[in-house]
Image: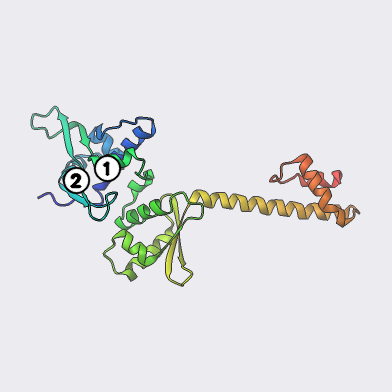
Amino acid sequence: MHGMATIWDADILIWCLSRLMARHQAGDNDVNGLIHTTPYELLRGIARDVGGEDYKRLMAALTRLQTTRVETNIRKGRRQFASFHYIESVEGASDDPKGEDLKSISIRVPDWLLHGVRSGAVLTLDREYFLLKGGIERAIYRAARKHAGSQSQGWTCRMSSLHEKTGSEAALKMFAFKVRELCQRDELPRYAMTDTKTESGEAAVHFIDRTFIAAAEVKERRTTAIRAGRDRARMAWIDGGHNPRQFDAAYTDWCELNHPADFVPNLSAIPRLF
């Protein structure tokens, strides 16, 4: 018995789908489900070591993916379902008569997954995902990647809902404790996690792409600098004996003539111009 495919085995499938998505996005509209690779390339692609034991674990994982049967009603509706194995077939080429030392591998993914690639319904994951060591971190990242995506406002999820989405077997209280630890460490790829509450007071987590946080911080710093520049320019205007009521119009004219609206002007030049 080989057992059921694990969350760690899924790295192989994710890597295969990313290869197919790359081909599809490059303009191959007739992409098929066959991936040609080597054990070394595949292990490196999922951030694993490449020793002898790692090779054996890779072969075992491929077997589990090939023997694990999946049933789903996604895309079909509640009264219909699709059934397939995570990997349809695996073939290899070897110089070893026993075939134990494969030099290359050909992996075929099922048509159900291939359809998702062709329709653009496969969500890409960050390379750092493969470096996550904990299963709960991986499950939380996937939930954030799916729901927060690239929303500028991010995504807020109730703790109880996140507990269900990740499929965690831990009690909700222990799960929440772990999630709050993750929020404090802030080590999730791409997304920042913040411990928060819903409007009704329920425990929740907010996820947002760090790109938007960085952009917001830059905008805030720029706004603060512009406001400070304007205040200093007003002081210089008044110290120069000018009418304070005429400052707004003069400052606006000066900025329009000398700098774009979002640029912090050279304050040392303002008193002379005014």
- In the figure, is residue 233 to the left or right of 195? right
Residue 11, quarter of picture: top left
Mark 1 and mark 2 lie on one chain; the one further toward the N terminus is 2
Disc 1 from disc 2: Cα separation: 9 Å
How many marks do you count on the picture? Answer: 2
**Which residue is pictured at 77% across the width and 44% down the height?**
255
Q: Residue 84 carries which label?
A: 2
Residue 100 picture location, percent across and down: 12, 35
Observer-nearest of 80 and 56: 80
**Which residue is pictured at 14% across the width and 27% down the height?**
95
Element type where label 1 sits in the image: helix
Q: Can residue 30 be seen in this view?
A: yes
**Which residue is pictured at 38% across the width and 34% down the height?**
25
Q: What's the residue type where badge 1 is placed?
A: Leu
Q: In the picture shown, does residue 13 fall above or below 137?
A: above
Residue 148 picture location, percent across and down: 43, 53
Q: Which mark is residue 113?
A: 1
- Does the CB distance between marks 1 and 2 fall below 8 Å? yes
